[in-house]
Amino acid sequence: MGQSERWHRSSRCEAHNCVEVAYRSGQVLVRNSQYPDGGVLEIEPGSWTTFCDALRAGKLHG
């Protein structure tokens, strides 16, 4: 990843073990905040929106 990405973390993140999100060239980038130099997922914006909507609606269970 280049240094141009601006990573965002939820304001609810308290333990620094969170997901961070950035946007680049029509993709949503997702990484683990504890391992910022580790792997990054690249997700289509529509898929990311669908995922976030399902989370908010309580449709995803572990």
Image (tube, grey):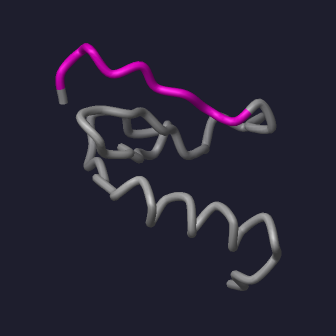
Determine the main secondary structure of the stretch shown in magenta: loop
On the rendered structure, is 56 left or right of 31? right
Identity of the residue drawn at 18% across and 22% down: 2
Please name whichever residue, 44 or 4, is drawn nearer the observer in this view of the structure.
44
- Dividing the image into 4 quarters, which one contains the N terminus? top left
Residue numbers of the magenta segment: 2-10
Which one is nearer the viewer's eye here, 55 or 50?
A: 50
Measured from the top left, where is residue 15 in percent x and y?
A: 72, 37
Q: Quadrant of residue 9?
A: top right
Q: Is residue 4 magenta?
A: yes
Q: Residue at x 41, y 53 (%)?
A: 45
**Residue at x 61%, y 43% (from the top left corner):** 17
Q: Position of residue 32 (x, y in %)?
A: 45, 45
Q: Is residue 55 above or below residue 40?
A: below
Q: Is residue 50 above or below residue 36?
A: below
Against 3, residue 18 (above or below) is below
Give coordinates of residue 29: x percent, y percent: 36, 43
The C terminus lies in which quarter of the figure? bottom right
Most extreme residue toward the top, as rendered? 4
